[in-house]
Amino acid sequence: MAFNKRVKIQELFTQDYVGKEIVLMGWVRTKRSNKNVSFIALNDGSTIKNYQIVADPNQIDEELLKKATTGACLKIKGTVVASQGAGQSTELVASHIEVLGEADAEKYPLQPKKHSLEFLREIAHLRMRTNTFGAVFRVRHALAFAVHKYFNDKGFFYIHTPIITASDAEGAGETFKVTTLDLKNPPLTEDGSINYKEDFFERETNLTVSGQLEGELAAMGLGEIYTFGPTFRAENSNTARHLAEFWMIEPEMAFYDAEDNQNLAEDFLKYVINYALENCQDDLEFLDKRAAEEETSKKADQRSELGLLERLKFVVNNDFERLTYTEAIDILKNSNHNKKKKFQYLVESWGVDLQSEHERYLVEKHFKKPVILTDYPKEIKAFYMRQNDDGKTVAAMDILFPGIGEIVGGSQREERLEKLTQRMEEMHIPTEEMWWYLDTRRFGATPHAGFGLGFERLVQFVTGMGNIRDVIAFPRTPGHAEF
Amino acid sequence: MAFNKRVKIQELFTQDYVGKEIVLMGWVRTKRSNKNVSFIALNDGSTIKNYQIVADPNQIDEELLKKATTGACLKIKGTVVASQGAGQSTELVASHIEVLGEADAEKYPLQPKKHSLEFLREIAHLRMRTNTFGAVFRVRHALAFAVHKYFNDKGFFYIHTPIITASDAEGAGETFKVTTLDLKNPPLTEDGSINYKEDFFERETNLTVSGQLEGELAAMGLGEIYTFGPTFRAENSNTARHLAEFWMIEPEMAFYDAEDNQNLAEDFLKYVINYALENCQDDLEFLDKRAAEEETSKKADQRSELGLLERLKFVVNNDFERLTYTEAIDILKNSNHNKKKKFQYLVESWGVDLQSEHERYLVEKHFKKPVILTDYPKEIKAFYMRQNDDGKTVAAMDILFPGIGEIVGGSQREERLEKLTQRMEEMHIPTEEMWWYLDTRRFGATPHAGFGLGFERLVQFVTGMGNIRDVIAFPRTPGHAEF
């Protein structure tokens, strides 16, 4: 017999149920009782809003009501009535309550008080039951769906690029090894090195750092594609901005040049942020208030000028500033900030890589809006970026967001076989192993471009969460692989 | 200057461009020439349909036309006109052609002839440029989008469960190890075993075999969730049905019992298959013809009674047959097939695991429709499945499809702490390590259920491709991690 004949709490706020007898199921957030009546705030995860249950001790057994403590799971039958109290327009007058699962107040870690984010990270298996994390993960869902909807509506095809890969030619960072060999007694070759012929894939394999190269292969057949999958960095970075396992979105488009790429990336970012604004109003209002409270604990000079919601609307409604790396260096070099030596790394000459402090200066102080920086020196960018005619720069772009820094990195790809192989040789990337990548330049090559977006950075920006570990369900960082 | 001012070929079949001057870009599939005119069939990946380009040698340089061989990439300016030829309603009369990238006919592996699927697997970096694989990957995209749309529309939240995990408690299969240790000189503890304290995560980690357990954690806060991510099996299975890396969809729902779970799974499967029927008509018609041709090479008794499209429509339009394992054993035991010893494994007693041949008999011979088998013996199912009152069976379900066998496996989950820990102890699963999983039964437990769907099996069913390696872009199998 089907059990789930319930109404979702979210529906009670959007549809008229007054006078109807319904069943609700959910978890107790709080309970207030006096001798005449108990008020239970119930949440079922479908919305950040709790729904008020009114229980009359003459109707509902008192022993049972005692078990309806914070965290307990209830099934409640009752009638929806217009509410007399403030704060809600309707409420449920309970005729029957069943405790599906208790939550011993002595032992249940989530009591109705403020818990630190650090504490909640240690109980990540329960933190989705809180207002903050409920909101974060509903917004994360909406953003993920917006990503798929945006690309689907534009005729892009979703490609699952491989997670286990034998190629680390991109050199995007330290990789995790994947193996089935016995680590204690690995098979050795005659010369004493590991005999990977006996490993599962008969070669050395690792976890992918990017699906871009495989994405390019697909774009050369399907035209416009995107990936959305996990990527990995085995870097020992214990910061609020780094995860060892994170999700990336990587569109690759045949027939796009650098400007087409910039146009797409800006349009895409605005679309997904606007989607969240339109579809996650309750959650974002909660997170907006939460962020505002966090701000009060910061020093005056470190506070944001705009609130969370203001910041999101600002991004959606304003053109991103586009300028070249060379122009950015000029601005930075001549800035009072640089002259007064307020940068930790002073900007003195063309060719240096930009530090986070420089990116934030451009975005937050100078332009006060998102910035697309283009045409970086080829020495500080990857081998596959298209070489500009000046011989010094490549058709790269980075998109910089306030508070986040780099949120998108991309480029037009080098489609000219000769220029590509020459650059690979200069950078000591083995061209033989990459025969399949080079084939796309040997046969039916075309101008093409693409970019990568770290999904968690986007979720951080939209939710206002300061630590990246708080926007993925079960974060993987050095020393941490719990749950 | 933006380069991509082109019309996608797909748009030429849905919108009226007659009389308009446009730019097309794409790859040459075939070229037919006589001294008066050349016809080029151009494909840009947006649709399986090629578009006919008409090039007059008086207008277009002949040397240039010589370079427009199969696989070459062209940019063509011209005017759309009503076509005089059969097979298309409009065509493009070229005024200007630019060869973006050549494809030397001596070297380009994809010539206009039939290539074997085995050969195309070896050039998986190019196979998306063929009709068959273009169709397969467009359908795969549509199915993936339908998955997200279905769950989003129902109020489910997409959760990214971890890929790297320290828990293999489910025991779903052999795992891949993930490590940053030096395999040649791994650090050892005093007693000579590997010192995982020095590994990246300071413990032994592997690639996930399922996101279910973490999905349950999320469902206990958010209500209804789903995962859609890669999962891994380090099994040495070189079959047409197994991959070492594949994508799984795993919904988990609070407040669902076994029947709710079955209802959802059936509704979900019908929705996504119907979505493909409605959105991939051209591709599915091509694949339908392709499958019919494949059938002619099979022995008469191995041919399907229904064509691909008929099979898909049949699934969408008919209720799945639901019966218990016990009822299925009775049917199988008493079948003529069993009595005449046509099964490799004869069905003699209750309790045996069903083989693929038995599942196919039920689906293809006995019921002739998809089957939901429920209430399996607890000994052949996982520890987390809810124990039925009979003490012998659990509230499991497997959904069996024609030609594919098991496409979905799921169950109501055991929410009763005592019964769950007892079963874990019987099955030697360490309860201490699983404290976080058990917490969901300690605090606010509720009936809940979920299932898993192997995405590639679904893509196989919808595309009619016989080998699972042909429905994922870059398949990972024993000895194979190319590209």
Image (cartoon, coloured by chain):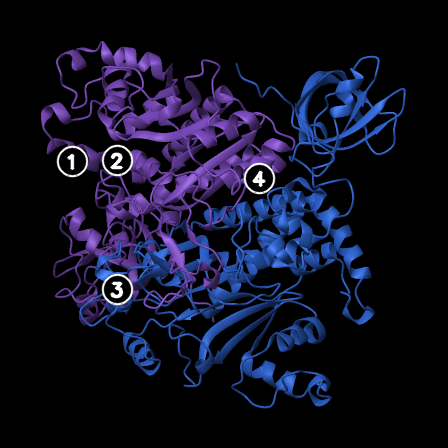
Chain colours: A blue, B purple
Q: In this rendering, is residue B91 above or below B426?
A: below
Chain of the residue under label 1? B
Task: Respond whether the residues carrying marks 4 and 3 are from the same subunit.
Answer: no
Residue, disc 1: B294
- Tell me the number on the disc at residue A436: 3
Question: Residue A260: image x %, image y %?
Answer: 47, 65
Q: Which residue is mark 4?
A: B218
Tell me if label 4 and label 3 are in contact, CB under 8 Å: no
Give the foreground label among 4 and 3: 4
* CA distance for labels 2 and 1: 10 Å
Identify whether B171 is placed above or below A476: above
Do the residues indicated by labels 3 and 2 lie within the same chain of the protein?
no
Tag 2 near tag 1, CB within 8 Å: yes
What chain does badge 3 belong to? A
Q: Residue at x 51, y 47 (%)?
A: B160
Q: Residues within 10 Å of mark 4 (few under 14, many from 20)?
A: many
